[in-house]
Structures are given as C-alpha cells and as structure tokens.
Amino acid sequence: MLASTGITTQPRYTSVATDLLVESVSTRKGSADSLIFPIVFLYRHYIELRLKSLLHDGYRLLDRAHKPKAVHQLSKLWPRVRNILEELWPDDDSTALHSMDLLIKQFEEVDPRSTSFRYPKDFKGNNSVKLEQPKVNLRNLAEVMNSISIILEGSAGAISEYQGYKNDMESDHW
C-alpha cells in the first residue's frame, strides 16, 4: 500500500495499540485479513489527529487564529501543516516534508475521506475499498508509519518547546 521512504527508523511513536495489532499479526500463522481494516484505519486516524493538533499548536505559536473544521481529508490538512513547518523552520532540508507529501498522497488514493477502512460499504452499497482483496504489507506499513510519526511527533515536540519558550518570555515581561 505505501512505498517505503528511506527515512531511518527510530523508536515507534504511533499508536501503541496499532503497533501491537501489527505485531500480533506478524507472530501468528494464518491470514491477517480480519485485522487489516482496523490497523489501516487506526494508522490513518492517528495521522489525521496529529495533523489537526499540529495545526492548532502551530497557529497558536504563530499567534494566528485557528477555527477547527470538520475536515477528514489528509490532503487538505497536510499542506496547511507543511506551511506552518516551513514558516517555523525555513532553512531546514525539505526531504522529510517531500516524503510526507508522497505518503499523504498514497493514503488519500486509498482512503480519501477516512471511510474506506472504517465502513465495509459506501452510501451507495459499493465496497469501500476498491480492491478485490486489500493487499497490505503490514510490516512495511508499520515501518512507513514509524517514519511518518518521527516527522509528526518531532514537529509537535519542537512546537511545544518553542511555545514553552514563548510563554516564559511573555511571563517575564509582566
């Protein structure tokens, strides 16, 4: 499903529950078909929630108003997050951000509105996943999600640190 990024893997930051499901599948015999849907859904939902929190925290750090919207499309959330990250760190190498562009695009192709792996059928009664049988390499997906989480969690941690410095500086002035 997702192509490997070449990003060096670090300790996992994604959903522990999802990582445990992937580990469970990899250590048992038989088919993993029954767990593919919840695993992909949980990983995708993790990305969506982290992007939304980065939007909130990034706009707060930049002293900009942010009105959360009921948007589930990663392709609408990610460019806004990317803009924040580029504004905060304009001189950083954009290789990781470019990798995220590609990974977000791949998730969008398979699950554009966060419903493909949530519901077996769409509103018209068609199969949500357009494949005859979903073919997902769970080990590769877990590795790719680990790479994504390094970018997202690293960004969140840095924004949090900057916000702490900003709060300290503002409190020193009062």
Image (cartoon, rainbow, N blue to C red):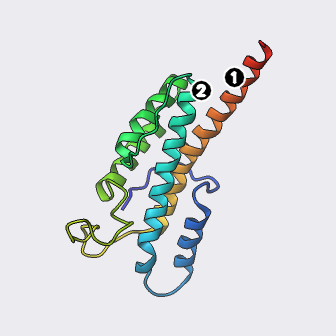
Question: Horizontal and vertical percent for residue 165?
Answer: 72, 25
User: Viewer-proximal residue, 62 or 92?
Assistant: 62
The residue singled out by tag 1 in the image is 166
Question: Horizontal and vertical percent for residue 100?
Answer: 43, 44
Q: CA distance from mark 1 to mark 2?
A: 8 Å
Tag on residue 61?
Answer: 2
Q: Count the numbered circles shown.
A: 2
For residue 25, above or below residue 85: below
Residue 89 seen in this snapshot: no
| Amino acid on which the number 1 mark rests in the picture | Lys
SS class, disc 2: helix
SS class, disc 1: helix
> For the point 51% across and 54% down, which residue is it?
46
In the picture, the quarter occupied by the N terminus is bottom left
Asked whether the residues under the numbered discs 1 and 2 touch, taking CB atoms below 8 Å apart as contact, a structural biologist would say: yes
For residue 34, above or below residue 70: below
